[in-house]
Image (spheres, rainbow, N blue to C red):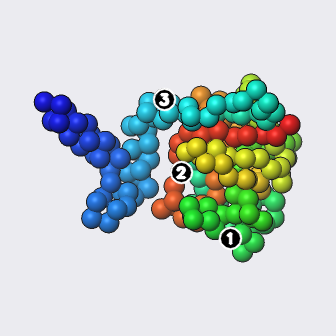
Amino acid sequence: MTYKRIALYALVIIFSFGIDWATCQTPGYKARQATIKANEFHHAAIYIADIDPTEDQTDQRQDVRFTSFWPGEGSGNKTASGLGVEDFRTNAQGWFTYQGKVVVASATEECLESNAGACRKYSKLPDGYQLHRLFDELTLLVDGVEYPAIILDHCGASFWDEQHQRYDIYVVDEDHLIDGPGQVVIDP
């Protein structure tokens, strides 16, 4: 009976993530979005529980939701910093990096202060959210792994009042889509 139950759970997990075992790839963007929505309760339960702050820890950690943006999905090839894909390298995860740091879009002071373009929609930041400046550096904790990062773009969704603030990671294409929990470490 136990093996049948385990097999049933395994099938539920396989179908919920929609893995195509023939190609070892997930289905297209829309299907991945549906999978993400269907599993939000799962994501809420696994927010990096294995990180234990020590007594001498001086950094500030914030639970966040990592999402992604990529060239061609409407964001273009340039960031608000003026740097673009030609200035970046990619890491093993398919994320753009600049000087060894992951390229991230977030809620920025420049966007908050702007009255032009998409930024004109955002006049305040929800309580407890972080506001950055372009070129600020921070550390991302994704699946328990630390990545140095740099804010090079604005992210309007980072201003949305949600359970966790969003941080957008700039990825090479939609096959490297990210949508899940993590933490941001902001040094004092």
Q: Nearer the viewer, residue 90 or 69?
A: 90
Question: Looking at the image, which residue is at 69% across and 40% down?
Answer: 184
Q: Quadrant of the N terminus?
A: top left
Q: Nearer the viewer, residue 34 or 147?
A: 147
Helix, strand or loop for disc 2? loop
Real-space Cα distance between discs 3 and 1? 33 Å
The image position of residue 187, as x and y in percent, is: 82, 40
The image position of residue 11, as x and y in percent, is: 24, 43
- Name the residue type under label 3: Ala
Mark 2 or mark 1: whose residue is earlier in sequence: 1
- Name the residue type under label 1: Arg
Helix, strand or loop for disc 1? strand
Local crowd size for mark 3, using a 10 Å CA cut-off: few (<14), some (14–19), many (≥20): few
Residue 63 can be seen in this image:
yes
Identify the residue at the far left of this view.
Answer: 1
Q: Quadrant of the C terminus?
A: top right
> Does 34 sit left or right of 170 as displayed?
left
- Return the residue at label 3: 45
Residue 37 lies in quadrant: top left
Question: Looking at the image, which residue is at 48% across and 62% down?
Answer: 175
Q: Is residue 172 above or below residue 139?
A: below
Helix, strand or loop for disc 3? helix
- Return the residue at label 2: 178
The image position of residue 43, as x and y in percent, is: 48, 35
Question: Looking at the image, which residue is at 56% across and 39% down?
Answer: 181
Residue 150 lies in quadrant: bottom right
**Marker disc for residue 160:** none
Local crowd size for mark 2, using a 10 Å CA cut-off: few (<14), some (14–19), many (≥20): some
Real-space Cα distance between discs 3 and 2? 17 Å
Q: Is residue 103 above or below residue 126?
A: below
Q: Nearer the viewer, residue 40 or 56?
A: 56
**Front label number (2 vs 1):** 1
